[in-house]
Amino acid sequence: MTAVHHDRTELSVVIPMYNEEDVLPALVDRLRPVLDGTGVGYEVVAVDDGSTDKTAARLEDFRAQWPQLRVVALRRNSGHQAALTAGLHNARGAYVASIDADLQDPPEKIPEMLDLAKAQGLDIVYGIRSDRSTDTGFKRWTAGAYYWLIRRLVGKSVPAQAGDFRLLSREAVDALKTLPDQQQVYRLLVPWLGFPSGQVTYHRDERAAGETKYPLRKMVGLAITSITSFSAAPLRIATWLGIISFFTCLAMLVFTLAAYALGNTVPGWTSLFTAMLFLGGVQLICFGLLGEYVGRIYTAVQQRPTYFVARDTGGSAAAPEAASRPAAAGGGSGAEARVPSGRPEAGHLPPA
């Protein structure tokens, strides 16, 4: 199919990648005909998140045959959400779709998302997984538990079974770029915006090739980041644990006084040892919860960029925003302006 070239970029497709050399041929074979068939000007922003395999070389090979393919290479592995941030911040399209490289989310749904957004004037179109039968039972259970907990803590605005497969308008992308969050969790940030939204449903397929980049350790980390970034409920849990332990100690005191009054004061270490373990465990839990929040405050105060771009084959898209940087505390000229963490101009280096 012959691609239709346009001067204006109507659609950007952002794809974070880390060690995806095996799936790249299948991804290109499915994605390119879909985008060529839309009849609009588009670009594909492939963000190489510091891959250690041949992902970078294979992207260059495909770029030689696919002019709309643009490679944004990060200097180191910064994580999936940071790579997604780099893609969103550097995309030029009037609409920006994000999709993973593993083809579990079907590229064929992107035109449907674009048509729905235009027809109904929507700023956000979520891809909703209506069928996850290809996932393991453990994966389905943990995903269900994650969305149930998040919707309880954050609110019903978070769509159930919606990952990072979505379409955003330019207005929504620009709004996300103003947020100073150091650790972005877009499946929570995007609903938080409150922009008009819609949904398309799809069947979730098996990974086309390669290995999953979200093992259990990263899934737990995502859940912890999601909860601590959007809710103070864990701190309230620490408070309730303190209250429960206080009343437990009072009950133990009453029991001890009663035993003394009745003469049942046989010395023993079991009750004392149990009480010490209980109180020590409660204190450690409380300190751990406090530490999570203090650590995030520390990270936010550091204001380190979440990524650094080593090379962008399409040139920098963030340069025009330099004049809109907010001034640092205490004033100062534009050249001295403070850049919020995660902004592309903070982490973007000139293209090679």
Image (spheres, rainbow, N blue to C red):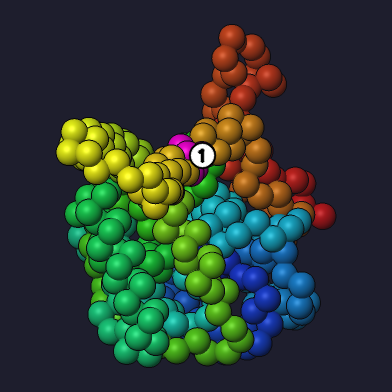
Residue 261, image quadrant: top left
Residue 100 position in % (x across, y down): 50, 73
- Residue at (26, 49) in percent of width and height: 153
Question: Disc 1 marks which amino acid?
Answer: Gly
- Residue at (42, 58) in percent of width and height: 223
SS class, disc 1: helix
* Side of 332 where 97 appears, left or right: left
Residue 335 position in % (x across, y down): 69, 21
Residue 302 position in % (x across, y down): 63, 32
* Side of 196 where 25 appears, left or right: right
Find the magenta span and give its range.
Answer: 287-292
- Residue at (82, 55) in percent of width and height: 352
Residue 334 in view (yes/no): yes
Query: Residue under circle 1?
Result: 291
Q: How many marks?
A: 1
Farthest residue toward the front?
A: 263
Q: Is residue 329 above or below residue 33?
A: above
> In this view of the protein, which residue sits in the foreground, 28 or 331?
331
- Residue at (39, 52) in percent of width and height: 270
Residue 112, image quadrant: bottom left
Farthest residue toward the top?
A: 330
The prevailing secondary structure element of the residues shown in magenta is helix
For disc 1, the neighbor class at 10 Å (few under 14, some 14 to 19, many from 20) is: few
Residue 95 in view (yes/no): no
> In this view of the protein, which residue sits in the foreground, 59 or 307?
307
